[in-house]
Amino acid sequence: MRKPCCDKQDTNKGAWSKQEDEKLINYIRKHGEGCWRTLPQAAGLLRCGKSCRLRWINYLRPNIKRGNFAEDEEDLIIKLHALLGNRWSLIAGRLPGRTDNEVKNYWNSHLRRKLVNIGIDPNNHRLISHKLLPRPENPHNSNSSASATSSGSKVPAATNTNPPVKSRCDNDLVSDAASCLEDEPCSQLPDLNLDLTISISAPSAAKLEDQEKTHKQFNISMDLDLSPSPTLVLFR
DNA sequence: AAACTGGTCAACCGCTTCTAA
DNA sequence: ATTAGAAGCGGTTGACCAGTT
C-alpha cells in the first residue's frame, strides 16, 4: 500500500489565502519549481505538495492568461479535442498561457454544450444523427447520451471518459479524429484538416531501439492546419 | 424576499507514468 | 528487472454566484 502523498491531518484544504499565495510565489522565485513534496515545509506552507503544484501551475505562474477564450482559441481547442480526446494537458500545451484545468473547465461548461446545440456529439465530433434514428439492433449502444453528462454529474469516471484511440472508424463506436485518420477518410468528419506528424527527439540509436520496443518517451509534435473548418464556422 | 436551479471554476482525489536507486 | 517515491494527469466535487420562479 502506497503512503499518501502528504500527512493529510496537518494540511490546509480549500481556497488559498493571499498569504499562502505570497509564500508560494516567494519560495519558487527563490528556489525555482520542483521537489513539490518538500516544498510546502520549506516554504512554510501547511499544504500538500500536490496542492502547491496545482496552485502554482494554474494560477500563480507568470504569463497565465485569464479571462474569456478568444474565438481562435475555441477553434483550436475543438480541433485538438477531436484529435487528442481528453488529453487536456496536451491541448493546453498548444494554447499559450492556458492551463489544462482551465481548458478542461471551459470545454465542459461552454464548448461541449455549444457543439451539442449545433448537433455535434462532443465526444466524437460527429453529427448526432443516430439520436433521430435509433438503431434497435444494438440497444446497448448509448454512448453519446450516457457520456454526454455535465461536469457535475455523479457518473463514475469510467463511463464518462473518451476511450483511447481506436483503430476502426466505426459509426457504432465512440472514436476520434485520430482514429479516423488512421483508416479511410471518415465520412462523418469531413471538416477536420489536421496534419499530424510524429517526430522522435533525436535519441541515440541504441536508445531509439529501446524506445521503439517500449513505445515510451516519444515526443509528439503536431503541425495543425488551422484554417477555418465548415463545422466551426457553423456556430459563429 | 425567499427558494430553487443551473452554470462556473478552483481545488481535491485517485490513478498512471516517470525516474532513480 | 524490480521497486518505491515523485510528478503529472484527468475526473469529480462542492462552494459560490446569477438568474428564474
Image: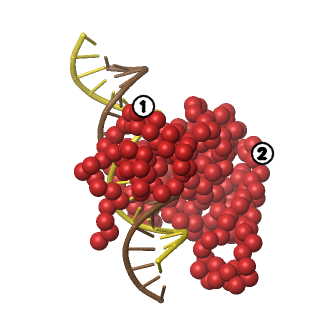
Chain colours: A red, B yellow, C brown
- Which of A120 and A26 lies nearest the eye of the viewer? A26
| Label 2: chain letter | A
Reply above or below: B7 against A39: above
For mark 2, does the 10 Å Cα neighbourhood hold few (<14), some (14 to 19), or many (20 or more) residues? Answer: few
Kind of residue indicated by mark 2: Ser
- The quarter of the rendered structure image containing the N terminus of chain A is bottom left
For mark 1, does the 10 Å Cα neighbourhood hold few (<14), some (14 to 19), or many (20 or more) residues? Answer: few
Reply above or below: A152 against C18: below
Residue located beneath label 1 in the image? A18
Give how far across and how far down residue A80 sits, in percent.
64, 52
Residue at the spot x=60%, y=74% of the render? A216
Give how far across and how far down residue A139 sits, in percent.
41, 62
Residue at the spot x=59%, y=80% of the render? A214
Residue at the spot x=56%, y=53% of the render? A89
* Residue A200 in the figure: left or right of residue A131: right
**Marks 1 and 2 share the same chain:** yes
| Label 1: chain letter | A
Give residue A177's quadrant in the image: bottom right
Task: Indicate which disc residue A227 carries.
Answer: 2
Disc 1 is placed on an element classified as: helix
Asked whether residue A86 is in view, the answer is no
Task: Indicate which disc residue A86 carries.
Answer: none
Q: Earlier in the sequence, mark 1 or mark 2?
A: 1
Give how far across and how far down residue A33 sits, in percent.
54, 51
Asked whether residue A229 is in view, the answer is yes
Give how far across and how far down residue A125 sits, in percent.
59, 52
Disc 2 is placed on an element classified as: loop
Q: In 3D space, how far apart are the residues under numbered discs 1 and 2 (Cα atoms)?
A: 42 Å
Label 1 with label 2: CB-CB less than 8 Å = no
Residue at the spot x=74%, y=53% of the render? A224
- How many marks can you see? 2
- The quarter of the rendered structure image containing the C terminus of chain A is top right
